[in-house]
Image (cartoon, helix red, strand yellow):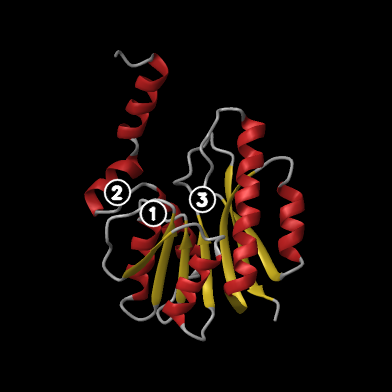
Amino acid sequence: MARSKTSQKWLKEHFDDVYVQRAHQEGYRGRAAYKLLEIQKRDHLIKPGMIVVDLGAAPGGWSQVVAKLLKGNGKIIAMDLLPIDPIDGVDFILGDFRDAEVIEQLKERIGDQKVDLVLSDIAPNMSGVSDVDQSRSMYLAELAFEFVKIVLKPHGCFLVKVFQGAEFEAFIKLLRSHFDRIVMRKPEASRNRSRELYVLASDLHS
């Protein structure tokens, strides 16, 4: 079957993308790794010794970044509904992070400790209808925050992808009621046309 002009254009843009090329050359599982690396360079949110959870981790690019930054000192637990190929230094839990069983598996891995940092680069399956996609994205961000309230330690941090739109301000207001500092980041590795932003919420109230 012949590809449409739209899909041909997307494929050309994808393979011409400097971050796609870098990911291939440097062994990362996707261009998204560079978004986290940019945020890390600015905010220094990942440090050796931390316990980090990566929600919606597949295909694993963010977990790769975290594992390298931890340098063998700390824990990175990746979670997804989809299986991912093993990554050195990364503990993977297959399942929905909302499920009690999955949370119990996390607790088995970290014992009595709580998590220092929760990452969520989750995006919905895109419909192409911007209002629908934005609403779905914010719903996933809110679900990630419910998880954060269960597992994150006092003064811990939460980095989450959101899409600007109707529910955005209400979500930011919700985060401000629980964290001392909220900043927005738009990494250069985010495509210009994308409405995605990353919200870094720091210092969870005790």
Disc 1 residue type (three-letter): Ala
Which residue is at 66% across, 40% downward? 135
- 62 to 105, vertically: above or below: above
Quarter of the image for the N terminus: give it. Answer: top left
> Residue farthest to the bottom?
112
Please give the label number shown on residue 52: none
Q: In which quarter of the image is residue 76?
A: bottom left
User: Disc 3 on helix, strand or loop?
Assistant: loop
Please give the label number shown on residue 122: 3
User: Disc 1 on helix, strand or loop?
Assistant: helix
* Rendered location of residue 46, percent (x, y): 46, 71
* Rendered location of residue 44, percent (x, y): 48, 70
Residue under label 2, please give it.
23
Quarter of the image for the C terminus: give it. Answer: bottom right
CA–CA distance between discs 2 and 1?
8 Å
Give the mark nearer the N terminus: 3 vs 2: 2
The answer to whether the residues at label 2 and label 1 have Cβ atoms under 8 Å apart is yes
**Is 96 on the left or on the right of 83, as rendered?**
right
CA–CA distance between discs 3 and 1?
13 Å
Please give the label number shown on residue 33: 1
Disc 2 residue type (three-letter): Ala
Q: Residues within 10 Å of mark 3 (few under 14, many from 20)?
A: some
Give the mark nearer the N terminus: 2 vs 1: 2
Which residue is at 33% across, 41% downward? 18
The answer to whether the residues at label 3 and label 1 have Cβ atoms under 8 Å apart is no
> Residue farthest to the front?
101
* Rendered location of residue 130, percent (x, y): 62, 31
Give the mark nearer the N terminus: 3 vs 1: 1
